[in-house]
Amino acid sequence: MSDSLKTLLIIAFLIVIVWNLGAGLYYMLVDKGTTKRTVNALTRRIALSVILILIVVLSIWMGWITPHGVQG
């Protein structure tokens, strides 16, 4: 897998996570607690965040990506 594809995958996950966070805020303001759409959106956000962390940890463990420190 190329480096740009890995980067795009991580960025896509982050965009979907932020989208679900915004959807949760929108549903919270619009629904006024009458539906469970806010809970569902925030649950999806947490699940996607956990999946992204697991993918990154697995990728580091398998050697597909290599962590590096801040260059100074």
Image (cartoon, rainbow, N blue to C red):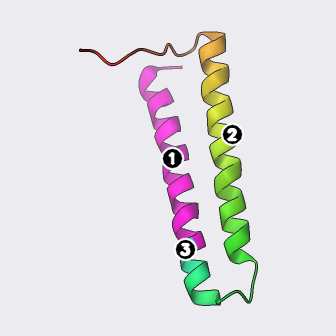
Disc 3: CA contacts within 10 A as few (<14), some (14-19) or many (>=20): some
Answer whether residue 14 is magenta in the image.
yes
Say whether marks 2 and 3 touch (CB < 8 Å): no
Q: Which residue is drawn at the image coordinates 62% and 20% (left, top)?
A: 59
Q: Which residue is drawn at the image coordinates 50% and 13% (left, top)?
A: 66
Q: Amino acid at mark 3?
A: Leu
Q: CA–CA distance between discs 2 and 3?
A: 22 Å
User: Is tag 2's residue or tag 3's residue first in the polypeptide sequence?
Assistant: 3
Disc 1: CA contacts within 10 A as few (<14), some (14-19) or many (>=20): some
Q: Amino acid at mark 2?
A: Ile
Res. 51 mark? 2
User: Is tag 1's residue or tag 3's residue first in the polypeptide sequence?
Assistant: 1
Residue identified by numbered label 1: 14
Q: Quadrant of residue 44?
A: bottom right
Q: Which residue is drawn at the image coordinates 56% and 53% (left, top)?
A: 17
- Identify the image quadrant of the N terminus: top right
Magenta stretch, residue numbers:
1-24
The kind of secondary structure element at disc 1 is: helix
Q: CA–CA distance between discs 1 and 3?
A: 17 Å
- Residue farthest along the front direction in this orientation: 72
Residue identified by numbered label 3: 25
46 left or right of 26?
Answer: right
Residue 69 locus on image (x, y percent): 39, 16
Point out the frontmost of discs 1 and 3. Answer: 3
